[in-house]
């Protein structure tokens, strides 16, 4: 399955090109996992926050 996210420039859900898993700062000093990549149409940087696995 291709990774998808919301592009704020295109204002639509698009496929994330060159998606890599990164960690971001969260509230309260926690870290959150996210996907970071580019929009296939306009090239804008896109993020998709991933859920935590328990």
Image (cartoon, grey):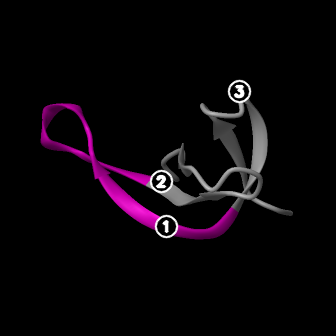
| Residue under the point 68% across and 44% down | 5
Q: CA distance from mark 3 to mark 1?
A: 23 Å
| Residue farthest along the right direction in this orientation | 1
Assess whether mark 2 and mark 1 are in contact (beta carbons under 8 angstroms).
yes
- Which of discs 3 and 1 lies nearer the camera? The answer is 3
Local crowd size for mark 1, using a 10 Å CA cut-off: few (<14), some (14–19), many (≥20):
some
* Residue 48 belongs to the span the image colors magenta: no
- Which of discs 2 and 3 lies nearer the camera? The answer is 3
Local crowd size for mark 3, using a 10 Å CA cut-off: few (<14), some (14–19), many (≥20):
few
Under circle 3, the secondary element is: loop
Under circle 2, the secondary element is: strand
Assess whether mark 1 and mark 3 are in contact (beta carbons under 8 angstroms).
no
Residue 15 location, x and y as percent?
Answer: 77, 54
| Residue farthest along the front direction in this orientation | 42
- What is the magenta range? 17-33
| Residue under the point 69% across and 50% down | 42
Q: Which residue is mark 1?
A: 21
Q: Is residue 18 left or right of residue 12?
A: left
Residue 47 location, x and y as percent?
Answer: 52, 47
For the stretch drawn in magenta, the main secondary structure is strand
Under circle 1, the secondary element is: strand
Q: Is residue 26 above or below residue 17?
A: above
Q: Which of the numbered marks, if any, corresponds to residue 3? A: none
Q: Which of the numbered marks, if any, corresponds to residue 34? A: 2
| Residue under the point 42% across and 54% down | 33
Q: Is residue 17 above or below residue 41?
A: below
Q: CA distance from mark 1 to mark 2?
A: 6 Å
Mark 2 or mark 3: whose residue is earlier in sequence:
3
The answer to which quarter of the image holds residue 26 is top left
């Amino acid at each position: 399955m291709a990774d998808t996210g919301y592009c704020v420039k295109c204002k639509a859900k698009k496929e994330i090109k060159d998606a890599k898993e990164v960690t971001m700062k969260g509230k309260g000093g926690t870290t959150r996992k996210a996907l970071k990549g580019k929009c296939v149409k306009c090239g804008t940087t896109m993020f998709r926050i991933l859920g935590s696995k328990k």
